[in-house]
Image (cartoon, rainbow, N blue to C red):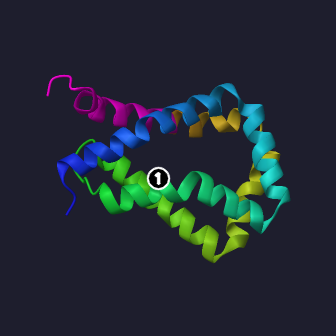
Amino acid sequence: MTTPQTILAVEALLALPLLVLGVSHIVQKEMWVGFFSRLAAQGRDGVIVRTFLFELWPASLIVVLHQDWSWPGVFITVYGHLLMVKVVLSLIIPSLGEKSLEQAEHREDWAFLPAGLVLIGLGALCAARAGPAVFGIGV
């Protein structure tokens, strides 16, 4: 059973990485296009790198330790479950993961904006919920 303390711990762990990745997707779009293009060139090896570097750890944390189906924590829980589906599909059917990486090569720079905004939104939600408990504000 997921406890409120566990949920806050997961949110505290995710807040900063989600915020940084989100801002980076917006202000360093060219860097991300290049990075994902290089991963795409690696084929299945690139899928493994992307999956283990960016997706598996937050998906696992959320699916295992963040079962909050109430408002607004449900957004984080749903994100984690969707990310885990992506992880499973990428590792079981690598051609799907390769197609996902190949799309980066053909995207305009602005295509990273929606992902950046989602990551910032999730990071801000985590920070707003976990920040007071982490820093002892209002507790």
Query: Dot 1 lies on which element?
Result: helix
Dominant secondary structure of the magenta stretch?
A: helix
Q: Position of residue 138 (x, y in %)?
A: 15, 23
Q: Is residue 35 left or right of residue 58?
A: right
- Name the quadrant of the C terminus: top left
Circle 1 packing at 10 Å, graded few (<14), some (14-19), many (20+), is many
Residue drawn at (81%, 41%), measured in percent from left and top? 34
Q: Label 1 sits on what residue type?
A: Pro
Q: In this view, does 72 lie to the left or right of 125?
A: left
Q: Position of residue 94 (x, y in %)?
A: 69, 72
Q: Which of 69 and 46 is in front in this view?
A: 46
- Corner quadrant of residue 101: bottom right
* 134 inside magenta stretch: yes
Residue 112 drawn above or below residue 5? above
Q: In this view, does 106 lie to the left or right of 58?
A: right
Report the span colored magenta: 119-139
- Name the quadrant of the N terminus: bottom left
Residue drawn at (75%, 48%), measured in percent from left and top? 36
> Can you see residue 107?
no
Residue at the bottom extreme of this rendering: 92
- Corner quadrant of residue 43: bottom right
Residue at the left extreme of this rendering: 139
> Can you see residue 87?
yes
* 57 inside magenta stretch: no
Q: Position of residue 54 (x, y in %)?
A: 58, 51
Residue at the right extreme of this rendering: 41
Q: Nearer the viewer, residue 17 or 25?
A: 17
The residue indicated by pointer 1 is 58
Residue drawn at (18%, 54%), measured in percent from left and top? 3
Q: In this view, does 86 lie to the left or right of 111?
A: left
Residue 133 drawn above or below residue 42? above
Q: Position of residue 53 (x, y in %)?
A: 61, 53
